[in-house]
Image (cartoon, helix red, strand yellow):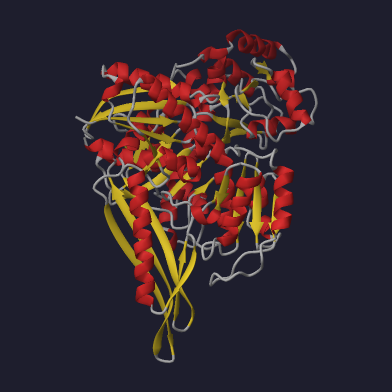
Amino acid sequence: MALLLGVDTGGTYTDAVLIRDEDTVIATAKSLTTRHDLAIGVGSAVRAVLAEADVKPGDVSMASLSTTLATNALVEGQGGRVALIYIGFKERDLTAHGLAEALKGDPYIVLAGGHNHAGGEANPLDEDALIIFLKTHKDDVSGFAVASQFATRNPAHELRAAALVAEITGRPVSSSHQLSAKLNGPKRAMTAVLNARLIGMIDRLIGRAEDTLKDLGITAPLMVVRGDGALISSAQARERPIETILSGPAASLVGAKWLTGIDHALVSDIGGTTTDVALLKDGRPAIDPAGARVGPYRTMVEAVAMRTTGLGGDSEVHFISEGLTGGVTLGPKRLLPVSLITMDAPDVVHNALDAQLRSATPSEHDGRFVRAVPGQTHEGIGAREIALLDRIGDNVHPLGDVLRARIEHGALKRLVERGLIQVAGVTPSDASHTLGRVMHWDAGAARKALLLFGRRRTGAGNMLSTSAEAVAEMVINQLTHQTSLALLETAFAEETPAFDLPPDVLANHVLMQRGMKNHRGLVKLETGLNIPVIGLGASAPSYYPAVGEVVGSEMILPEHAGVANAIGAVVGRVTMRQSGTVTSPSEGKFRVHLQDGPRDFGDKESAMDMLETALRDTAESDARDAGAADIQVSVTRDIRKAGVESREVFIEATITVEATGRPRVAEG
């Protein structure tokens, strides 16, 4: 009997599930995610699921982890301070391609060097300038990203820069050619920057998770879900954490298929921080050909074609003052629900809320609290941030008590982005507690916070509402509306060739919105989704029935929908892909572009055979390292030719090798 343990660390909850022989769920459990040390939540969930199933830890034959940590970090702008080494490009690329925004003020250097399209050196690498840069920043960043022009055609300069980083700084380094075999240097640079930013965070999570499992007596090796739904070893995930973006959502798709057996549906997974929507077609999730997009960032990571929106049960509720009636909108940032933080400091929160309700003058900080995240490093923050951290200390505080000047708002934002503090405020979770839909935390504190929120003034000068329940209904209705937009945008994105407008414009179009309300006038309008929706997530039963009614679709809420990610973590397969190119720099010469540099051949068949063999060896080796058994290999060749003077001329060939198999430990 194979006993499989799946664990998913979400923004709010950590889920655990035990599956016997890959076909029966025998136990599930949840624990609050502990942001300051995720392994605490992992340990609590695993202990609970083992106790429920009454099985011994040593009987577990495979453990697998899916996580929204990388996705949430990118959506919320969190991660370590990094430095970019940008070789052979122009400085203007940093702004033109969004790199400056992604760096958020972190250091960078633009160096001479790089290669041309054929893999020849364009300019020598400026090692002297690089050495000065590394010595300057070796102590104020957590890692380095290296991207060189046409590094996928010849990685020599990236390899040399990475060697110098290791020699001079000892810090982790992310080289763009190791993360993607595709061209588009700026996008590879973006991927390398985000990978470098995530390394410390993911390494700590996996390391602590492995230690926790060992302490519990689970000796099975740990697998991690990749962004395309495949499984990789924990060591591979530590080296390339960027590949775990969309890990949780990808696992949810695998879990949705396993739970329902449905081959064609939209899958919508609501968590604490994000809502992830994707199309399940012919029983498989599609891979995004343009690379995974998370929040504002487009990467070159192979991942499921999924639209990730900053919308969840813990999304920040914003007040809209414009207009006579006012209103609310949600996200994209996550807050701790007031009802949740009250569980840690009930006296502080209730006393502050009561005092704010008694005050005749509302404050912008009413209903908001702050606490530090213990155990975090303070690399790369300034004196003002350190002073604010010292003021917060180890306790929960009303936000207005710790902010003493307007200029400190910037320091607060930077501390949140670095993951050093957490802010609590009104969220949809608080609205659900106020309406009695869920009662996990402190509903009384949630009601008080919503009363405070309702005292805000609209454009007409009136209060938004004097009823906590009325404000809660506004929040839940807005969540329903924004979720329906996310579903419609995903559906329209799949049908883009049929329309001339972008998916978000189509979803928000007045005809679409009126049609979903079955407009009847001189014109009759009926619109909606023509496909079922599988709703996943712990809060899906609370929110998604109303969403199904709005979009006019069957809403499927399967049993164990709340732990679908954890289920997907253990029923997936190990899949390793390797891609490479053969070019023809001159007539009769065929160049194979390899990880260690280009090699030339006199005929194209020899070149392509050599590349296929190299890719096959690497893919099979990676699959074995990930723990796959019974490995199956498939190969595709995409050959581009052009007609010149009534004959075909070879331009380029791209070869992709895929090695796949179930994890070895699950077989026995």
Asked if 172 appears above or below 12 in the picture, the reply is: below
Asked whether 13 or 445 is in front, the reply is 13
Q: Is residue 667 placed above or below 645 in the rendered structure?
A: above
Q: Residue furthest left?
A: 1
Q: Position of residue 277 (x, y in %)?
A: 42, 43
Quadrant of the rendered structure where residue 318 is?
Answer: top right
Would you say 369 lies left or right of 344 here? right
Residue toward you, 259 or 453? 259
As drawn, 332 above or below 392: below
Q: Which picture quadrant has residue 147?
A: bottom right
- Image quarter of the N terminus: top left
Residue 435, percent from left and from top: 47, 20
Residue located farthest toward the bottom when viewing the structure as drawn: 645
Quadrant in the picture for residue 415: top right
Compared across the picture, whether 653 is left or right of 416 comes to left
Q: Position of residue 52 (x, y in %)?
A: 29, 17
- Whether residue 251 sits left or right of residue 129 in the image: it is left
117 and 341: which is toward the camera: 117
Where residue 493 sits: x, y (%)?
44, 54
Q: Which residue is at 28% across, 56% downward?
A: 633
Q: How many marks?
A: 0
